[in-house]
Image (spheres, rainbow, N blue to C red):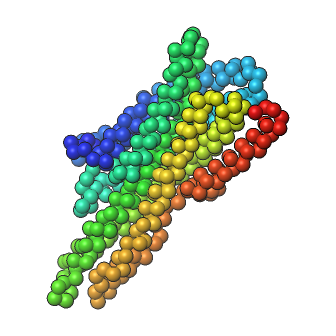
């Protein structure tokens, strides 16, 4: 998945973007494990780095402590009640997300490694299928989403840079560094969820292409032109391919569910953080009579982050349902009961593969969620504008 290819393609570009994002998250201390080639067969394996894990723990505790102290000092010096509420919510959400990262690293570290290695093994198995030997990650859809995600990350990282040239002293420099570190660490949870669910969708899409083209062609090739039945050897080879596809679908469902159980609470936190931030920042924009361009860019970035995450989840769910419409029912049927039972079991089991994301069982993340939030936000802001116009505050 992270391999390099001489031939430029969408999958290789996506793999390069993922490689850069992995290094970026490692530098920030979000990812404290390494991915290296195995000495025996050269396959990529995630391995723990205990010394780096403790370094991430100490540095995050130190920076979060400094950030909390400086944020409280800043909040107590404010006079605007709306800005005070926004600062409190921002500080609490960032610190809760930092605590969630600490819990994941030190209480679920081995579980995270197992999930990552399961993803890597699945990509190797899918690439080993005939017709799927192309390495990399996903296709054009995954490349497009990853490109927009990188734009959001770059904007997130560099939106505070102009403040470094605005009469800095040592206290303000430390405040900016801690604020950037804690804020980026908090939003990184959403980026990790995005990559995880995008990987599930890419795996489903790759296997669906194999079933739609290669497997269907191989099954229809069992029909002899002269009407003779296929040999036992051909049926055994076809049965092996059916079992392999079914096992891969099973593993994708299992790994996707394991990733979802691991990230569902942080996913709820980051969605709550994003929705609250968009609502409060939009309110603050109205109080400033829509003149603050930086706040508009902040709302746009938060909105695009949620949209990209929703698109990744929607793509994984859609790809898990595509296999039901592949029309394999018209493939070769013989009088052999064992082959008939195997094909019937394969077709029946495909109807159980549907990937859905329901954090804590509260709601399902889909495209409709964005519409529900936008409708609620527009209604809320409409009432605020009417109240502000009547009270001459806007």
Across and down, in percent, residue 40 comes to 23, 45
**What residue is at 29 percent from the left and 73 percent from the top?**
216
Residue 258 visible to the viewer: no
Across and down, in percent, residue 53 comes to 46, 32
Q: Looking at the figure, which quarter contains the C terminus?
A: top right
Q: Is residue 347 above or below residue 118?
A: below
Labels in figure, total: 0
Across and down, in percent, residue 78 comes to 74, 21
Q: Left or right: where does residue 241 sit relative to residue 200?
A: left
Residue 386 visible to the viewer: yes
**What residue is at 38 percent from the left and 33 percent from the top?**
23
**What residue is at 52 percent from the left and 14 percent from the top?**
165
Q: Left or right: where does residue 63 sit relative to residue 318?
A: right
Q: Nearer the viewer, residue 394 or 163?
A: 394
Across and down, in percent, residue 106 comes to 51, 37
Q: Nearer the viewer, residue 318 or 36?
A: 318
Q: Left or right: where does residue 160 sit relative to residue 45?
A: right
Q: Nearer the viewer, residue 109 or 290?
A: 290
């Amino acid at each position: 998945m992270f391999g390099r290819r001489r031939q430029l393609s969408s999958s290789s570009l996506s793999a390069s973007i993922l490689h850069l994002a992995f290094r970026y998250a490692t530098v920030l201390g979000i990812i404290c494990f390494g991915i290296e080639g195995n000495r025996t067969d050269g396959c990529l394996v995630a391995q723990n780095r205990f010394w780096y894990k403790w370094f991430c723990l100490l540095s995050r505790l130190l920076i979060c402590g400094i950030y909390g102290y400086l944020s409280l000092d800043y909040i107590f010096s404010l006079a605007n009640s709306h800005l005070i509420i926004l600062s409190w919510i921002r500080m609490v959400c960032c610190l809760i997300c930092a605590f969630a990262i600490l819990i994941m690293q030190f209480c679920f570290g081995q579980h995270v490694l197992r999930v990552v290695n399961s993803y890597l093994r699945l990509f190797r198995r899918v690439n080993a299928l005939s017709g799927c030997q192309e390495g990399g990650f996903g296709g054009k859809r995954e490349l497009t989403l990853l490109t927009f995600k990188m734009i959001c990350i770059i904007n997130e990282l560099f939106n505070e840079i102009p403040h470094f040239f605005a009469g800095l002293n040592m206290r303000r420099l430390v405040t900016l560094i801690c604020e950037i570190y804690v804020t980026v660490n908090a939003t990184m949870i959403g980026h990790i969820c995005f990559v995880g669910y995008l990987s599930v969708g890419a795996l489903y899409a790759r296997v669906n292409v194999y079933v739609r083209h290669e497997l269907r062609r191989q099954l229809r090739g069992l029909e002899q032109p002269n009407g003779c039945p296929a040999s036992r050897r051909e049926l055994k080879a076809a049965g092996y391919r059916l079992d392999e596809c079914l096992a891969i679908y099973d593993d994708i469902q299992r790994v996707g569910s394991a990733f979802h159980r691991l990230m569902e609470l942080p996913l709820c936190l980051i969605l709550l953080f994003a929705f609250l931030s968009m609502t409060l920042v939009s309110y603050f924009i109205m109080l400033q009579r829509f003149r603050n361009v930086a706040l508009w860019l902040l709302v746009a970035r938060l909105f695009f982050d949620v949209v990209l995450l929703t698109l990744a989840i929607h793509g994984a769910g859609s790809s898990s349902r595509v296999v039901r419409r592949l029309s394999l029912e018209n493939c070769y049927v013989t009088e052999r009961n064992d082959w008939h039972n195997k094909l019937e079991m394969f077709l029946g089991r495909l109807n159980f593969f549907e990937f859905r994301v329901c954090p804590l069982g509260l709601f399902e993340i889909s495209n409709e969620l964005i519409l529900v939030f936008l409708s609620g936000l527009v209604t809320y802001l409409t009432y605020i504008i009417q109240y502000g116009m009547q009270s001459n505050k806007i």
